[in-house]
Image (cartoon, rainbow, N blue to C red):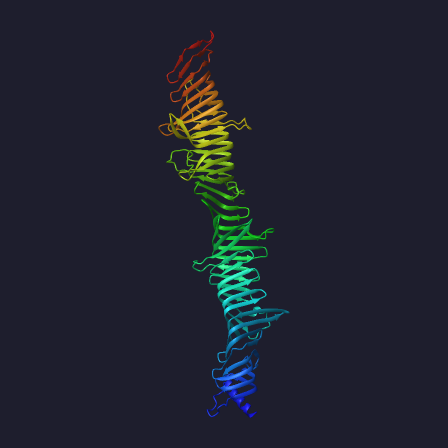
Amino acid sequence: MKFYALIFTALLAQISFAEKPAESSKMIPGDVANFELPSFDKKSGYKEWELFGKKAKYFNENKIDVFDMKLDMFDGKKTALKMATFITDYAEVSATEKTAKSASELTVTGEGFVLVGDDWLWNGDKRFVELFKSVKVNFESQKDEIIDKLEIKSEEAKMTYTGSDNIFTFYKNVRVSNDEFQISCEELETESPKKSSGGRIESLKEVRAKKDVVISHDRILANAGEATLIPNEGRLFLSGSPKIRDITSGASVEGYKIEFTKDDSTAVALSSPDKKTRAKARIISNENGKKQTTTIYANSIKMVSLEDKNLFFFSGKVHIENPEFEAFADEIKAYSDKGSKSGKYAISKIVGKGSVEFVKDARRANSNIIEIYPQKEEIWLEQNARLSDRNKGITLKAYEIVLTKEDNRATAFGDRSKENSFVSVDIAQAGNLGLPKKSVKKTRIKSRSLMAEWKEKNVLLRFARDVEVSSEDILAKCNFVDVFAQEDSVKGKSQVKKIEAFGDVVVSQNGSNATAQIAKIYPKVEIESQGKKTEHRFMEFLTDSEKPQFRPKMILPEIGNIGFAQMSKDAKIQKTQITSDKQSYVSGKSNDTYIFEGNVIISGTDFGANCDRIEVAITPDKFGKLQIAQISLIGNLKISQGKKLANAGRADINPARETVVLTENPIVQNEDGSRASGTKMTYTRGKQNISIENPRIKLPPIGTSK
């Protein structure tokens, strides 16, 4: 026993790190059993740890083999509370280095954790233990009868206990798991209080993972270069090219940094301060066997994963990339729902606000608000909506525009709450509807609503209610307008081929006005004359068969005396008015031609007539003012001026010369009852004479005064 006591004393002197013994006190190698060796803090004198072993073999102060070792760690205070226990079947202890090591398994048990591993090194001076093989630690705590468990495995680990917390660092092939999440990485660090208040496992202050981090939680899978988990708050912070993916839907978010909140399953991705790395989300739609990925970039992105849907909130310079379109906005919300039958996820709705821009093929749209319904293939643009087609040269403005993919249509409306809110369309290449190229004014059409339809190279625009058409020289108003445009194969821009107007049509053009129930405008038609084809504008004004009482009527420039008779003293200059079943207009290089057909009635300054057809030629005078140069009245003509009446097959009026030429069996009846006829009768007001070819005269009755 004296030998064992000597060895015990020597071990105590060396391992407790007391003052160095005298050189004459040399320890004798040998074995000792059932010993305990305490260590005390040099400053406070309180116990730091105490070593136990069933057997110890002393070689020298650098090598002491301890078998069935137990090492108790204390708080280093007066209370001497035990904080952890180290247990192993064998350890090599160095009194000089104040270390212990072994290839055997080590178990460290502390409050709320059990650490197990092989091939370990303990450093009592620096207060850490390292394990280099088959590491596993289990954290466990209980609160309100609820037990939480967390397991961490790795190839290597280190536990440091210098402060108030036990700091665990894991290396190589790290795996973390509990009932709620799993983590894999190459490095991980966490702190466990040496003495907790009995809190849940979330009382681990932080779990910090590095290098090839993969985290799974419920249906969420996260990847990052670094990750920090705050268990008691249920929050996860990711950096280093982080990405979070919803496993069920396939949706994901990426960014410079990502914060994930466990309780509401919310991920917030942020862009880098310099915006070189932008937050982005990928949303997978899988409907009817068609898989499509929509990528959305923003300064910040919030993704919420619910039971059967994902919600996305984008803020700051949002950019949507879809295989079929692009969109931009200040803010966007996106909804991805799980199909009730298919079980597949698909985007059901995207809502954007502020500086909205939508781009599809050659079409570009802008508005304050956008709503996209991918499953319905509809896009709604609201508040200051604008749609332009650079290929077609068409720009549409409205309060609200709805785009539908299935029929390739756009429907537009003015603000129904405002009286002066209209839809307007500018057609660049329609230009002036046929005027010379030097004119640059666009054709603009306004209405309360519009339907636009694209078919390959053709565009149909249908305007409804309070329609107004304006260009360089035309202003038209009506209830409905259809515009047919076609892309020019050479220039690539749309050319208006035809405009059809319906319902109370009123057209004003260069001093003339027309009213009708139906009007058709052809900006460019080819007319052959003398073997040459030239482009002209052609217009038609028609009677609606359902409203025959409303016939086309046109107001043309006024003329003076037509020359048929002396103008009445009380006659006033008035516009020339023509009513007929059908009216048309053809532009010309030097003059424009108006044609009136079917029960034509004309009235003007001190004259009136009715016939089957009228042709009017209008030319500009030397000041550019349009004037009637020629009027031809054809078929079953009846004409009157003052009290003079005439019947003929044709009459040609030259207002400038104040001349009327009657042909085709003309008969003239004067006020005094006399009658004249011939093959041709010419009345010239300026020369105060009448010329009759093959005349036949019937004098007035005798006694009749002039």
Pick the residue in front: 196 or 345: 345
In terms of image quadrants, where is residue 618? top left
Q: Nearer the viewer, residue 595 or 304?
A: 304
Look at the picture and state if 96 lies above or below 444. Answer: below
Residue 133 picture location, percent across and down: 51, 73
**Would you say residue 356 is visible in this rendering?**
no
Q: Residue at x 58, y 57 (%)?
A: 306
Identify the image quadrant of the C terminus. Answer: top left
68 over 405 or under it: above or below: below
Q: Quadrant of the N terminus?
A: bottom right
Q: Horizontal and vertical percent for residue 33?
A: 57, 87
Count of numbered badges drawn on the protein: 0
Q: Position of residue 565 (x, y in %)?
A: 42, 17
> 412 above or below 478?
below
Q: In this view, which residue lies farthest toward the right?
A: 145
Q: Residue at x 60, y 51 (%)?
A: 341
Residue 369 appears in view: yes
Residue found at the very far top of the displayed protein: 702
Question: Which is more toward the observer, 216 or 658?
Answer: 216
Q: Is residue 680 above or below residue 208?
A: above
The percent coordinates of residue 268 (x first, y second) are 51, 59
Camera-side residue: 211 or 514?
A: 211
